[in-house]
Amino acid sequence: MMTTDHAVKKIIQERKEEFFDYLRLASVSTQNRNILPTVKYVEQMIQKTGGKTQVLDDCGGNPVVYGYFPAGEKGNPDKTVLFYNHYDVQPEDPLDEWESEPFEPTVRDGKLFCRGVADNKANFVVRLYAIQALMATEDGLPCNVKFLVEGEEENGSPNLGPYIKKYADLFNSDGCIWEFGGKDEEENFVIQTGVKGMAYFDLLVESANVDIHSSLGAVIDNAAWRLTHALASLKNKENQVLVDGFYDNIEEPTEYARAVVNQQKVNSEKMTKIYGLKHPFITKDLDWSTEEALTFYPTMTISGLLSGYTDEGTKTVLPRKASAKLDCRLVPGQDPMYIEQVIRKHLDKEGFQDVELFLLKGLKAFRSDLESPFVQTVKKAAEKVYGKESEVVLSPTNAGSGPMAYFGEYLNVPVASSGCGFAESKAHGPNEAIRLKDFEDGALHMVQFLKDFQTA
């Protein structure tokens, strides 16, 4: 019987076209594209691997796919791991910056390019391949495996909470492997055990019923100035948020988590090169380090501005309307509704009662215990696979957001990430990609983890 390493290589080749067809499904949740065909395809891939499926579609939003693989005869039926993934992807724009068709899988220089390949379709597929490789061995699958594959993650998972609450018994497990993960700028394999929350807002102000000739700017205010002044009042040039209460209720990290973060070092030079940064990190004037900012502190970011005339040439007007998108990333202890309240109170206090504020998305942050046996098992398995070439790094929190808090609240499970992304995967951007070697290693990590988890 072939080894699991050889089995993984064989499965990758045998199921290549199936994987590519999955990538070709432009399952963009924000535009409601190809959702039901993708749900069916996810079902088929799980079933082809040998699992049972159930489509949950009674709590609103896009369907959730449940998958189940029982432990083999020599496995441990008392241990269960839950894999969380999502089948939806980001829109593909801007199209003119792609070097190949966004939804046509293309291999170049050892990389696989396609929208959604890094976030999150490849990570789902490598888990299936790991299960298939183990089921083909004499010992079979070492434990029970469940899947929760949702279709609204890229839209803020607005309906996932009710599904997990209602079907908590179905998703009951001893730990959850999260949807993302991979290599950082230093080629370290990073395992993250938490995510930041989110409070995402629309701001809107109107200053008149019509646009007005700019000559009257001598006496008339306009929406663009009103909004930029309001936004400027939220944060100073040293990048400290000035909203009273914004930093309230932040949970103090454990000494171990703080020690882990203090041992890490963000490579500003490499990050500057990857993203073509034009300015230094904004943490230079703050009381906390870059590493601490990414992990332990909330953020406030202007994600979009719109007002007035923006086409070529000139048009001298006082814009009557202005709007902005405001993105706040939160940490454990903070509540999106409370953040809305303190921003509203701040705007009113500063004289911007006319600036409307709408909370579009709210997610709480979550952080697992880095010292939990589950997290440590994920780490030790990674060291066996990646240890010869990379350092394996534990990180308490991913700087991005996701619906992890629901898993803590309703399932009470520790969470750890594992994936096949890398620092230049460009998730959400043009030319999104994974490296083929990372794809194979991602499957091998899951093989090793499931073996170790059996007796952990």
Image (spheres, rainbow, N blue to C red):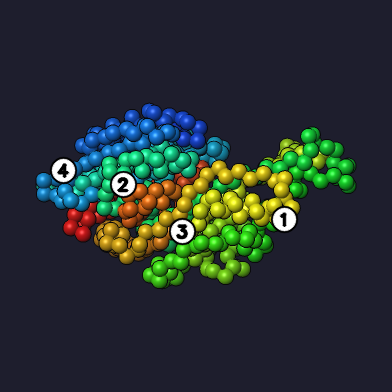
- The amino acid type found where label 3 is placed reads Pro
Q: Of marks 3 and 2, which one's residue comes earlier in the chain?
A: 2
On the rendered structure, is 442 left or right of 103?
Answer: left
Q: Of marks 2 and 4, which one's residue comes earlier in the chain?
A: 2
Q: CA distance from mark 3 to mark 2?
A: 23 Å
Circles 3 and 4: CB distance less than 8 Å?
Answer: no
Number of the front mark, 2 or 4: 2
Q: Of marks 4 and 1, which one's residue comes earlier in the chain?
A: 4
Tag 3 residue: 332
Q: Residue 350 — which label?
A: 1
Q: Of marks 1 and 2, which one's residue comes earlier in the chain?
A: 2
Number of the front mark, 1 or 2: 1
Q: Residue at x 73, y 37 (%)?
A: 311
Circles 4 and 1: CB distance less than 8 Å?
Answer: no
Label 3 crowding class (10 Å Cα cut-off): few <14, some 14-19, many 20+? many
- Secondary structure beneath label 4: loop
Tag 2 residue: 83
Number of the front mark, 3 or 4: 3
Label 4 crowding class (10 Å Cα cut-off): few <14, some 14-19, many 20+? some
Circles 3 and 1: CB distance less than 8 Å?
Answer: no
Q: Residue at x 28, y 43 (%)?
A: 169
- The amino acid type found where label 1 is placed reads Glu
Q: Residue at x 16, y 48 (%)?
A: 77
| Residue 261 percent location from the top left of the image | 43, 67
> Residue 234, can we see it?
yes
Q: Residue at x 29, y 53 (%)?
A: 175
